[in-house]
Amino acid sequence: MHSRDAVVAGLPELSGVGRCLVMGVVNITPDSFSDGGEWFEPDAGVQHGLDLLAEGAEILDVGGESTRPGAARVDEAEELRRVIPVIERLASHGAVVSVDTTRAAVAERAVAAGARIVNDVSGGLADPRMGHVVADTGVAYVAMHWRGHADVMDSLEVYDDVVAEVRDELAQRLDALLAVGVDPEQVVLDPGLGFSKAGVLNWPILAHLEALDALGRPVLVGASRKRFLGHLLEGTRGLPADEPAPPLERDDATAAISALSAAAGAWAVRVHAARASADAVRVADAWTAATRDVLDAGMTAPAHRTTAVGSTGTTADEEGLS
Ligand code: PMM
């Protein structure tokens, strides 16, 4: 069994989907690197969440503190003021809401307001009470690989073998969570792309997602609009050769990573632009299913499906094959 298919506690409607899920980002921050300030007012945040759902997101990740490298921390009261009203309103619309926080008190209040997932970029390291809150509430918990807050994270990117060290440090976080009573079924793991990881360090992690699969829990991939994509795209399509492509120019590359991550077995991708990634994970699903058909047939020619994966019921002519 792929770790993607492992049950995640408290999310029955998202279990058994059989393909990678899409988590849409709702940043209620004035200074996020990727969409800073755009959805800072609660009404705008809620509307943005609803738009992401309409574009195909299955989870909405609401955050009130920027993790942009070098960013200063916001205090707890301000973080609560930003996220709680938005979580309440999105949850009342029936959305599966996740709260992006490193603070146990914010996680607790967010769950009371309707959040079903706690997404902690510190994997429990930033707040010693976090594991206990997760155990007590029983909610799903994303534990991300992390070495320090935004003001110091760039100075902590020292690795001999980035894939093995990220895997081993995540395994330690998992053990620490289980030791305080968290059920393994609550946990989703995330390699933390871009967090204490400079450009080139992110590619081996993506290319070896199966190393995390070995930990037995589903994996979330958060590549969306990150700096390493900006560097990848330097000098393309008329962009300056010596400057990273700006965040809003990174969505197509993000969708490509969503497809590849989904094909590699990721449980979910966390993205700012949901539509392209919702399409991408479906492409990966159809691709993987067709590959499986060939393998099941003993490496002979595939038995052609009579109904396409995700078929809308329209004929080939209506859909326009050319
Ligand atoms: N990245 C950011 C914020 N939260 N959460 C998880 N689980 N994984 C990530 O990679 C991640 C995250 C930073 O991106 P943003 O500032 O655009 O939200």
Image: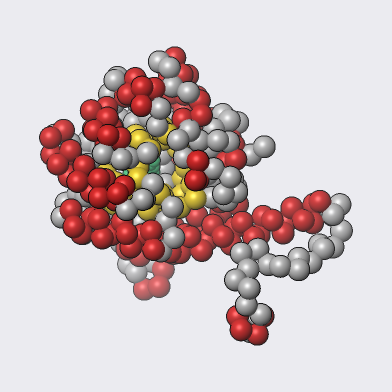
Q: Quadrant of residue 181?
A: top left
Out of 259 and 290, give the one closest to the viewer. Answer: 290
* x 64%, y 60%: residue: 286
In the displayed structure image, the side of residue 225 where residue 214 appears, left or right: right
Q: Quadrant of residue 140?
A: top left
Q: Is residue 130 visible?
A: yes
How many numbered discs? Answer: 0
Q: Quadrant of ligand 1?
A: top left
Horizontal and vertical percent for residue 185?
Answer: 51, 29
Q: Is 19 drawn above or below residue 210 in the view shown?
A: below
Q: Is 244 drawn above or below residue 179 in the view shown?
A: below
Question: By what rule are the colours in the image chosen?
Answer: secondary structure
Quadrant of the drawing holding the C terminus: bottom right
Out of 317 and 237, give the one closest to the viewer. Answer: 317
Q: Quadrant of residue 70?
A: top left
In the displayed structure image, the side of residue 297 where residue 278 appears, left or right: left
* x 56%, y 60%: residue: 282
* x 80%, y 52%: residue: 295
Q: Is residue 205 visible?
A: no
* x 35%, y 42%: residue: 98
Horizontal and vertical percent for residue 65?
Answer: 22, 41
Q: Is 274 drawn above or below residue 312 in the view shown?
A: above
Quadrant of the drawing holding the N terminus: top right
Horizontal and vertical percent for residue 261?
Answer: 54, 50
In the displayed structure image, the side of residue 306 where residue 138 appears, left or right: left
Horizontal and vertical percent for residue 137?
Answer: 36, 26
In the current view of this chain or complex, which residue is farthest to the top?
Answer: 179
